[in-house]
Image (cartoon, rainbow, N blue to C red):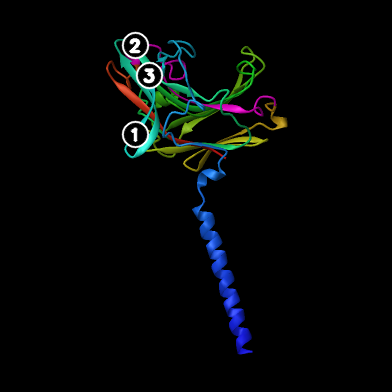
Amino acid sequence: MKNVKYFLFAFLLFLQQACASHEDDSRALNPAESYFFVDEFETFNEQVWTKEVHEPGWVNRELQAYDMEHVTVGKDGDKSVLILTAEHKDGMIYSGRVNSKGKMNFKHRTIEASIKLPQTANGLWPAFWMMGDNEKPWPQCGEIDIMEMGEKNGIAKGTTETFLNSAIHYGTSMEAHRQEYHAADFAHSLQDGLYHTYTLEWDAYKLAVSVDGILFRVFDISRVSGREDYFHDSCYVLFNLAVGGDFPNILEKDQITALPEGAKAHMYVDWVRIY
């Protein structure tokens, strides 16, 4: 009987060690293996991202010219990051915008990005958003704005550091454009020199936006919402740092207090993950 107890104890101990070993192995797995897509921005991956080039006023009456020189990958402390730089130089304003159109898209997944925003003050307009990667014109293609800051109401209230916008745009034509947006002061500053995580959970029924794990807005895209036709195609991803335009309602360069002549401002993206 003593031998039976000994072997039973040894067998149970073996099982416990085996289970512990299995748990340790699972924790040691590379987290990237569970992602549909991840970019840590060690380099600028042209197989995924396109640097956009546009003249001032191309859309939304924005004041900047987008060019390739104002999109870089570099260091922010010990982080390797995507850097979008807005610059006011020789009477002109330049900035950066990237997208993954035709290169990387997805649907019905979760996407999140770790972003450090500049002080938007009066005139900067950073955004993290998505568009339908299809042949449909805007807004029929569907647009999902996960994060935008610098909107005119935040400027008017003096709460630009906390006033956050999320929105969806859709419709059969520009004339029939419809939108739903949520704008509110977030629980803490998002322009405090720190990185914050912006998340979109997207499934067949909803678009749920969270910031630093705090739910901000849920948009209904189910069949009964009337939006089903617009938000179930694969989407591509965009990051940009606009200057002026309709969103902040600032249309003159000398009113951009965040970017006087000779100044630069930066939007940093540490990583983006889709799973």
Determine which residue is flagged by label 3. Answer: 69
**Earlier-in-chain disc, 1 versus 2:** 1
- Classed neighbour count for the residue bearing mark 1: other residues with Cα under 10 Å, few (<14), some (14–19), many (≥20): some
Name the residue: 64% across, 89% down.
1
Exactly how many numbered labels are in the figure? 3
What residue range appears in magenta? 229-255
Determine which residue is flagged by label 2. Answer: 92
As for residue 232 lying within the magenta part, the answer is: yes
Residue type, label 1: Lys
| Figure quadrant of residue 174 | top right
Q: Residue 159: in sight, yes or no?
A: no
Q: Residue furthest left?
A: 262
- The picture places residue 160, in percent across and down from the top left corner, at 39, 28
Residue type, label 3: Glu
Q: Nearer the viewer, mark 1 or mark 2?
A: 1
Residue type, label 2: Met
Name the residue: 65% across, 19% down.
171
Question: Secondary structure beneath disc 2?
Answer: strand
Determine which residue is flagged by label 1. Answer: 75
